[in-house]
Amino acid sequence: MVELVIVALFAEVDAESSNNTVTKLLVDLGYACLTHHYDTVRGIEAVNVQCDEIWSFCFAKQKNVPADKAGEFGYGDVWTWTGIDADTKLMVSYYIGRRELEDAQAFMADLADRLVGDVQLTTDGHGPYATAIRENFGEDVDFAQLIKKYRNEREGAARYSPAACTGIERRVRSGNPDPATISTSYVERANLTMRMSMRRFTRLTNAHSKKLENLICAVALHFTHYNFVRQHSTLKTTPAVAAGIADHPWTLQDLIGLLESVEDAKPRERGPYKKRRENLHSN
């Protein structure tokens, strides 16, 4: 996906422009996409939302982070929290942070702010979800966790293959969720799309982000493309059109057109990430 955007950007700039110029444009476009999502993906009438977290890393893998950078966010493990509408396939909310309670709180606060009406939530068994959902959606929200059980890790070359799932357990945490729709299949498929569409999320490669800013911008660009440009094979349109927040599928030129708002994008980027964490500490 990013490769297509790069080709389109090269068509927009001077033929002698350097790679650094195109890289800067991609970062600027990422900020613009972040702001567009922040402003546009709101008032979503979703009935069934699935949430998950996907791992990546910045600068170096956690075990290789230099001592002077240890514990500093943006060095080592980085997690992207995602929440998808199972019906329209719209990625309603995403949040880049650690895999801790305060990050679950920030993610769920953002998700709740974008949804209207009653909703059923399904997550994996990660512990912080229960507290974060209760505090942002209330005690009576329809909420269940789907917990998968896997075989022990294998030795040798087989350790690079996904562990085999040996069973699942559905746990109702609050409300009265429909057992038939307690699932994380759609959000896990969206995670696969992330790994296939962004090289920095592909496992066992050296294509990781060197800077947190680059990862944030790449994810923002991906989800704007996913929501507004990429036509879903089942929907026969884009998730944004299916959700009623766009009246037609975008072209790549429409996506690149967001660069016109880039002067307003950078300050707004600080809101979805830094300000959320600051507010959590002040409450």
Image (cartoon, grey):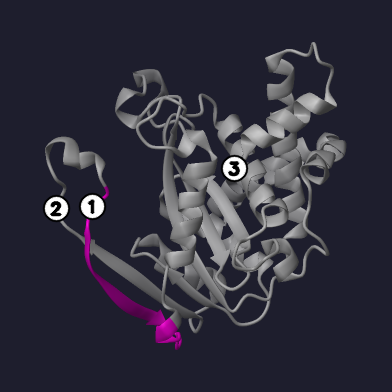
On the question of residue 99 being in view, the answer is yes
Circle 1 or circle 2, nearest the eye: 1
Q: Which residue is mark 1?
A: 163
Q: Which mark is residue 219?
A: 3
x, y percentage for residue 48? 54, 76
Circle 3 or circle 1, nearest the eye: 1
Provide the secondary structure element on which disc 2 rests.
loop
Q: How far, Cα to Cα, is label 3 from label 1?
A: 26 Å
Q: Which residue is painted at 36% across and 24% down in the image?
A: 65
x, y percentage for residue 150? 21, 59
Q: Which mark is residue 103?
A: none
Provide the secondary structure element on which disc 3 rests.
helix
Q: How far, Cα to Cα, is label 1 from label 2?
A: 7 Å
- Circles 3 and 1: CB atoms closer than 8 Å: no
**Dot 3: few (<14), some (14–19), or many (≥20) neighbours within 10 Å?**
many
Q: Amino acid at mark 1?
A: Ala
Q: Which mark is residue 152?
A: 2
Provide the secondary structure element on which disc 1 rests.
loop
Q: Amino acid at mark 3?
A: Val
x, y percentage for residue 128? 39, 61
Which segment is the magenta one? 162-180
Q: In what quadrant of the picture does the C terminus appear?
A: bottom right
202 w.r.t. 40: above or below: above
Residue 245 lies left or right of residue 198; in this view the side is right
Residue 239 falls in which quadrant of the image?
bottom right
From the viewer's side, name the closer residue of 33 and 101.
33
